[in-house]
Amino acid sequence: MPHPEPFIPLTPPAALEDLRARLRATRWPDAPEDAGWSLGTDLAYLRELVAYWADEFDWPAQEAALALLPRFRIPLGGLGIHFVHAQAAAPAGSVLPLVLCHGWPDSFWRYTKVIPLLTNPGAHGADPADAFDVVVPDMPGYGYSGRPAGAPLDCIAVAGLWAALMGVLGYRRFGVAGGDIGSAVSRYLMHRTKPQTAAAGLTDSPAGLAAWITEKLRAWSDCGGDLERSFTKDEILTNITIYWLTATIGSSMRMYHANAAIPAAQHARRVEVPSGFSLFPGDILRPPRAWLERVANVVRVTEPMRGGHFAPFEEPELYAQELRAFFRPYRADGPVRQ
């Protein structure tokens, strides 16, 4: 049986020197006057962000902060899978394991703010009985997980890997939460057709990578047009720097191409396990309840007051409250450990 090994990456200084040199040598495009964000990433903001990335952003400090999380790698399905495994602190009852599944364009980064709220609710003004063991894997081709050398994995294959991972960790019963519910096909049009075309430029240009990801963070968050209302520059650049240093922007987009090949009949299968949906106001698409009930055994639908596509990062307290409330009735349904 595969065994998890502790994982603490340390970026070589030469990689950071190369990054800064590329940033300072950016060849900037032109932009129409007063275009702002109407045509994509605002050029003035991007220049400001890139200058900060080159001269002020402290990646070693961010890397050290991420290293405080209990992080591991394990061989699964021929790939090295990176994951966080944070166990409940001072539990006051039955602890439920919980897998948190990130989306794009991010990684385990999406859940870094909410992990302590879930593992140690008592320290954050909530009921200690609501503590979780939290597992946050990086999907193959994302973050610090290995990139498939052949065909990219689709979401069904990744689900199989996560089930195997939870088995290795000794969990026989667990909850699952993730984003990207009800996403529109058009949102992933480029990823699903020719992802390798964009990958060539985004893997070579950190400014281009920043433009690509920053526009998505602004458009898909509940920021009201002010990106830094939801994310600080350090938070934005931590996410982008993970993509840059791991060179995973191309492999992350290829998964959407794989998902496009999933048969329609598979998509139409109804999820019969109890399911809950939190429809955050700033997310890209908020599906109607009638549709949700056709595709899942819906037991809870809520509409939090704030938050967008990146709700665990934007509004970690609200997100944690949603998970605690949904899973509370399912904590005592039998043993969770093998």
Image (cartoon, rainbow, N blue to C red):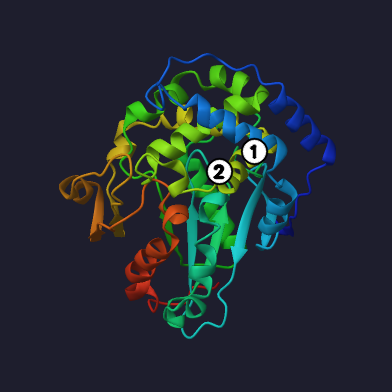
- Residue 14 seen in this snapshot: yes
Q: Which residue is mark 1?
A: 52
Q: Position of residue 167 (x, y in %)?
A: 57, 61
Up the image or down, 294 lies above or below 209; here it is: below
Image check: 31 left or right of 69?
A: left
Q: Position of residue 25 (x, y in %)?
A: 71, 21
Q: Nearer the viewer, residue 299 or 306?
A: 306
Residue ID at (39%, 79%): 332
Q: Position of residue 314 (x, y in %)?
A: 44, 53
Image check: 68 left or right of 172?
A: right
Residue ID at (40%, 76%): 331
Residue ID at (60%, 47%): 234
Which quadrant of the structure image shows residue 142? top right
Q: Which three-letter amino acid code belongs to the residue tagged 1?
A: Tyr
Up the image or down, 42 lies above or below 234; here it is: above
Quadrant containing the C terminus is: bottom right
Q: Which three-letter amino acid code belongs to the residue tagged 2?
A: Ile
Which residue is farthest bottom? 92
Q: Secondary structure at mark 1?
A: helix
Image check: 207 left or right of 318?
A: right
Residues under numbered marks 2 and 1 in contact, where contact means CB atoms less than 8 Å apart: no
In front: mark 2 or mark 1?
A: 1
Q: Which mark is residue 19?
A: none
Upstream in sequence: badge 2 or badge 1: 1
Q: Which residue is mark 2?
A: 236
Q: Secondary structure at mark 2?
A: helix
Q: What is the crowding at mark 1: few (fewer than 14 residues within 10 Å), some, or many (at least 20)? A: some
Q: Nearer the viewer, residue 115 or 157?
A: 115
Up the image or down, 258 lies above or below 312; here it is: above
